[in-house]
Amino acid sequence: MERETLRLLEMLNQLRLTEEQKEKVISFCNNREAALKALDAIDTENVERMVHVMPVLTVVREDIVSQPYTAEELQQGAPETDEGYWCVPKVME
Protein backbone atom coordinates (compact mmCIF):
# COMPACT_ATOMS: atom_id res chain seq x y z
CA MET A 1 0.00 0.00 0.00
CA GLU A 2 1.25 3.43 -0.85
CA ARG A 3 0.90 6.55 1.28
CA GLU A 4 -1.40 8.16 -1.31
CA THR A 5 -3.79 5.21 -1.15
CA LEU A 6 -3.81 5.40 2.64
CA ARG A 7 -4.43 9.15 2.48
CA LEU A 8 -7.47 8.55 0.25
CA LEU A 9 -8.75 5.85 2.60
CA GLU A 10 -8.33 8.22 5.55
CA MET A 11 -10.33 10.85 3.73
CA LEU A 12 -13.10 8.46 2.63
CA ASN A 13 -13.45 6.98 6.12
CA GLN A 14 -13.02 10.30 7.91
CA LEU A 15 -9.99 9.09 9.87
CA ARG A 16 -7.00 10.89 11.26
CA LEU A 17 -4.09 8.53 11.82
CA THR A 18 -0.83 9.40 13.49
CA GLU A 19 2.40 8.77 11.59
CA GLU A 20 3.02 5.70 13.73
CA GLN A 21 -0.45 4.32 12.94
CA LYS A 22 0.05 5.02 9.24
CA GLU A 23 3.31 3.07 9.26
CA LYS A 24 1.61 0.15 11.02
CA VAL A 25 -1.29 0.10 8.53
CA ILE A 26 1.04 0.29 5.53
CA SER A 27 3.27 -2.44 6.98
CA PHE A 28 0.27 -4.68 7.75
CA CYS A 29 -1.20 -4.26 4.26
CA ASN A 30 2.14 -4.88 2.57
CA ASN A 31 2.66 -8.05 4.64
CA ARG A 32 -0.83 -9.29 3.68
CA GLU A 33 -0.13 -8.55 0.03
CA ALA A 34 3.16 -10.50 0.19
CA ALA A 35 1.37 -13.43 1.85
CA LEU A 36 -1.29 -13.46 -0.89
CA LYS A 37 1.37 -13.40 -3.58
CA ALA A 38 3.05 -16.38 -1.91
CA LEU A 39 -0.26 -18.26 -1.95
CA ASP A 40 -0.84 -17.35 -5.59
CA ALA A 41 2.55 -18.83 -6.45
CA ILE A 42 1.51 -22.30 -5.25
CA ASP A 43 0.69 -24.70 -8.09
CA THR A 44 -2.84 -26.01 -7.49
CA GLU A 45 -3.40 -27.39 -10.97
CA ASN A 46 -3.76 -31.03 -9.82
CA VAL A 47 -5.56 -30.32 -6.55
CA GLU A 48 -9.19 -31.34 -6.38
CA ARG A 49 -11.57 -28.53 -5.44
CA MET A 50 -13.28 -28.80 -2.06
CA VAL A 51 -16.40 -27.32 -0.57
CA HIS A 52 -15.45 -28.29 3.00
CA VAL A 53 -12.01 -28.79 4.46
CA MET A 54 -13.22 -31.62 6.68
CA PRO A 55 -15.62 -34.33 5.50
CA VAL A 56 -19.21 -33.54 6.41
CA LEU A 57 -21.11 -36.38 8.02
CA THR A 58 -24.80 -36.19 8.72
CA VAL A 59 -25.74 -38.13 11.78
CA VAL A 60 -29.33 -39.26 11.45
CA ARG A 61 -31.32 -40.94 14.17
CA GLU A 62 -34.68 -42.62 13.94
CA ASP A 63 -37.57 -40.24 14.44
CA ILE A 64 -39.40 -42.04 17.22
CA VAL A 65 -42.35 -40.35 18.90
CA SER A 66 -42.15 -40.67 22.65
CA GLN A 67 -43.66 -39.04 25.72
CA PRO A 68 -40.96 -39.27 28.40
CA TYR A 69 -42.90 -37.19 30.96
CA THR A 70 -46.55 -36.92 31.81
CA ALA A 71 -48.27 -33.52 32.13
CA GLU A 72 -48.59 -34.12 35.88
CA GLU A 73 -44.83 -34.77 36.22
CA LEU A 74 -44.04 -31.56 34.34
CA GLN A 75 -46.41 -29.52 36.49
CA GLN A 76 -44.86 -30.73 39.75
CA GLY A 77 -42.36 -27.86 39.54
CA ALA A 78 -45.01 -25.22 38.87
CA PRO A 79 -45.75 -22.85 41.73
CA GLU A 80 -49.50 -23.12 40.99
CA THR A 81 -51.73 -24.96 38.51
CA ASP A 82 -55.41 -24.80 37.61
CA GLU A 83 -57.15 -27.58 35.67
CA GLY A 84 -53.90 -28.67 33.99
CA TYR A 85 -52.65 -25.16 33.18
CA TRP A 86 -49.72 -23.34 34.77
CA CYS A 87 -50.67 -20.21 36.70
CA VAL A 88 -48.19 -17.39 36.31
CA PRO A 89 -48.16 -13.84 37.66
CA LYS A 90 -49.75 -11.16 35.48
CA VAL A 91 -47.00 -9.30 33.60
CA MET A 92 -48.97 -6.54 31.88
CA GLU A 93 -52.05 -4.67 32.96
Image (cartoon, helix red, strand yellow):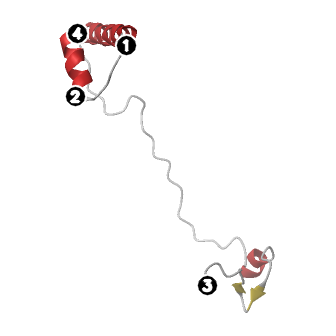
Q: Which mark is residue 12?
A: 2
Name the element at disc 2: helix
Q: Residue furthest bottom?
A: 83
The mark found on residue 85 in the picture is none
Identify residue for label 1: 18
In this picture, residue 67 sits left or right of residue 24: right
- Classify mark 1: residues with Cα within 10 Å, few (<14), some (14-19) or many (20+): few
Distance between the Cα atoms at labels 3 and 2?
Answer: 51 Å
Q: Which residue is mark 4?
A: 3
What amino acid is labelled 4 in the image? Arg
> What's under tag 1, amino acid-wise?
Thr
Q: Amino acid at mark 2?
A: Leu
Q: SS of the residue at dot 1?
A: loop
Q: Residue at x 27, y 13 (%)?
A: 36
Could you tell me how far apart the alpha carbons at marks 1 and 3 are, in whole angstroms?
57 Å
Q: Are marks 3 and 2 in contact (CB under 8 Å)?
A: no
Quadrant of the rendered structure where residue 89 is? bottom right
Indicate left or right for 91 with 36 as reference. right
| Image side of residue 23 versus residue 69, left or right | left
Q: Amino acid at mark 3?
A: Glu
Quarter of the image containing the N terminus?
top left
| Residue wearing tag 3 | 93
Is there CB contact under 8 Å for labels 2 and 1?
A: no
Distance from disc 3 to disc 4, alpha carbons, whole Å, reads: 63 Å
| In-image side of 72 versus 43 (left or right) | right
**For marks 1 and 4 on the same chain, the one whose residue lies earlier in the sequence:** 4
Q: Residue 30: image x %, image y %?
A: 29, 8
Circle 2 residues within 10 Å: few <14, some 14–19, many ≥20: few
Residue 57 higher or lower than 71, as above or below: above
